[in-house]
Amino acid sequence: MTALTANAAPSRWTNNRAALRFMRHRLALLGLAMIIFLTLACVVGPHLLPYDSLYIDLRARFAPPLTGHHFLGTDPLGRDLAARLLMAGRISLLVGFFAMVLSTLIGTLVGVIAGYRGGWIGASLMRMVDGFLAFPSIFLVLALAAALKPSPIMITVVIAATSWMEVARIVEAEVRSLREREFVQAGRMLGLSGTHIMFREILPNAMGPIIVASTLTVARAILMEAYISFLGYGIQPPLPSWGNMLNGAQQYLGSAPWLAIIPGAAITIAVTSFNFIGDGLRDALDVRDDHI
C-alpha cells in the first residue's frame, strides 16, 4: 500500500468537484466544443469534399467562397480552399499536440527532479531553465528552423525544444511545495526510493498545474508553427499548414482577402479555444477554491 492509497476516496471526491467546476465554466465548454468540432472536421472533412487539397483547376482560380462546389473558394492555383484548410488543420493540430507532449515530458522531468532534489542539482537545473528563458524563444525557433530541413517532425521538435521551460518552472515550484507534505514523509518512512516518491507519489499530486500548462502549450505551439511557416521556415508547400496558407495569401489581400481571412480565423479559433479550456481547467483544479 502506498501513501496515496489512503487518499483515494478524497481524491475521487476532489476530481468530481473539479469536473463540476469545469462544466460550469461556459467559455471552457465552448472552447472544448470548438476543438472537438475542429478535430472532427479535419479528420473526416477531407473525405466528404469533392476535391482533394492538391487538385488544381486553373479555370476556377480565385473563386470566391460559396462558388459552385467550392464552399470556401479557391486559391491562386484553383485548389479548393476548404480541402486545403482541413488538411492544414491536421498538420497544425498534430504539430501543436505532439509539441505539447514532448515539451511537457521534458519540462516535467526537469521540474520534478529540480523540485525534489533541491540543493546544487535543483539550482543547476533551474539556472539552465533561466538561461533558456533569457534568450528570446522566437529567435531560437527561427534559427533552428533555418538551420534544419523543414518538415512537420522537425518543426514539432523545434517548438518542443523551446517550450518546455515554462512547464519546468511550474512543476518545480509545485513539487517543492509538496516534498515536505505528510504523504511524502510517510513514503520515506516506508523506505520508498526517491524515484518512486517523485514519480508515484508527488507527481500525481502535481498533475493539476501540469494539465493546465499543457493545454496552454498546445495553443502556443499552434501559434508558433503558424508564425514560422508564415515566415517561410516551417511547413513547406505543397504540404499545407495554416501558417503557409497565410504566407501564400499576403500578396492577394486586396483582390482575394478570403485567402488570408479563412486560415487566420482557423488559427484564432483554435488558439482561443485552447486558452479557454486552459482557463477552465485552472479554475476547476484550483484546490484553494472549495465552493462549487
Image (cartoon, rainbow, N blue to C red):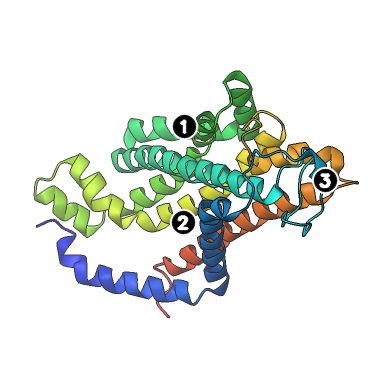
- According to the picture, the residue beneath numbered tag 3 turns out to be 62
Q: What residue does disc 2 label?
A: 212
User: Residue at position x 26%, y 68% from top?
Assistant: 11
Q: Which of marks 2 and 1 is nearer the N terminus?
A: 1
Residue 112 vertical position relative to residue 5 in the rendered view, above or below: above
Work out whether mark 2 precedes mark 3 in sequence or the reverse, and give the earlier one: 3
User: Viewer-proximal residue, 96 or 244?
Assistant: 244
Q: Is mark 2 on a helix, strand or loop?
A: helix
Q: In this view, does 152 lie above or below 39?
A: above
Q: Quadrant of residue 38?
A: bottom right
Tell me how far mark 1 sits from mark 3, CA to CA. Answer: 53 Å
As drawn, the label of residue 127 is 1
Q: Nearer the viewer, residue 259 or 281?
A: 259
Q: Please state which amino acid type lies under the numbered disc 3.
A: Phe
Left or right of residue 233: residue 214:
left
Q: Identify the residue at image location x=52%, y=73%.
A: 25
Secondary structure at numbered mark 3 = loop
Q: What's the amino acid at mark 1? A: Arg
Considering every residue shown, the one lying at the far right of the view is: 254
**Residue 291 visible in the picture:** yes
